[in-house]
Amino acid sequence: MTEARNLGYPRSVMTSSSPPSCIFCKIVSRTIPARVVFEDGDVVAFHDAHPVAPVHVLVVPRKHVAGVEDVSADESPLLGRVLLAARAVAAALDLSESGYRLVINQGAGAGQSVFHLHCHLLGGRLLAWPPG
Ligand code: AMP
């Protein structure tokens, strides 16, 4: 799993809930480029533009949800889809044994800068704890 193939998933998923300025909605709809490593009907995973570890991939739901605080009960399965996709990407990138970290920043105070729910997959180096 290096770069994504066209797996036949719909490219156009912009909906009325997709803010026109949302950069991750634009990546999901392929309006702007990204190094996509995985996609299925629910999520897209792509390399972070400013990696902070040798592996730094973002997993986002296709559906626009601003953050964890905005996930409705109906949408809660999306959280599982995001985590399982992150696990699949970690396995494909050989991180299952060495370990990896999954991070979701919720809110500006936690460092969230893009308000489309995303999970950071970090690995490929020793990861200190606690995070800053
Ligand atoms: P956060 O600060 O948790 O909201 O994370 C947002 C992440 O998105 C940051 O790590 C950015 O480097 C990354 N990012 C922003 N724009 C892009 C982009 N166009 N392609 C890939 N990653 C991006």
Image (cartoon, rainbow, N blue to C red):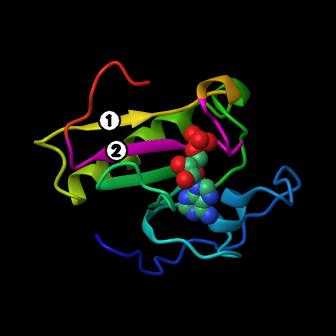
What percent of the width, then of the height, locates residue 36? Answer: 46, 69
- In front of the other: 35 or 113: 113
Q: Name which residue lies at 52% across and 78% down.
A: 8
Q: Around disc 1, counting alpha carbons within 10 Å, would you say few (fewer than 14), some (14 to 19), or many (20 or more)? A: some
Q: Quadrant of residue 130?
A: top left
Q: Percent x, y for residue 123?
A: 27, 46
Question: Is residue 115 in the magenta section?
Answer: yes
Q: Which mark is residue 122?
A: 2
Q: Quadrant of the C terminus?
A: top left
Count how many numbered circles sit on residues in the image. Answer: 2
The residue at label 1 has a CB less than 8 Å from ligand 1: no
> Does residue 92 show up?
yes
Please say whether residue 110 is one of the residues in the magenta stretch: no
Q: Are marks 2 and 1 in contact (CB under 8 Å)?
A: yes
Question: Residue 9: x percent and y percent?
Answer: 56, 71
Residue position for label 1 = 101
Mark 2–mark 1 Cα distance, whole angstroms, equals 5 Å
Magenta extent: 111-125
Quadrant of the snapshot with the N terminus = bottom left
**Residue sitting at the far bottom:** 6
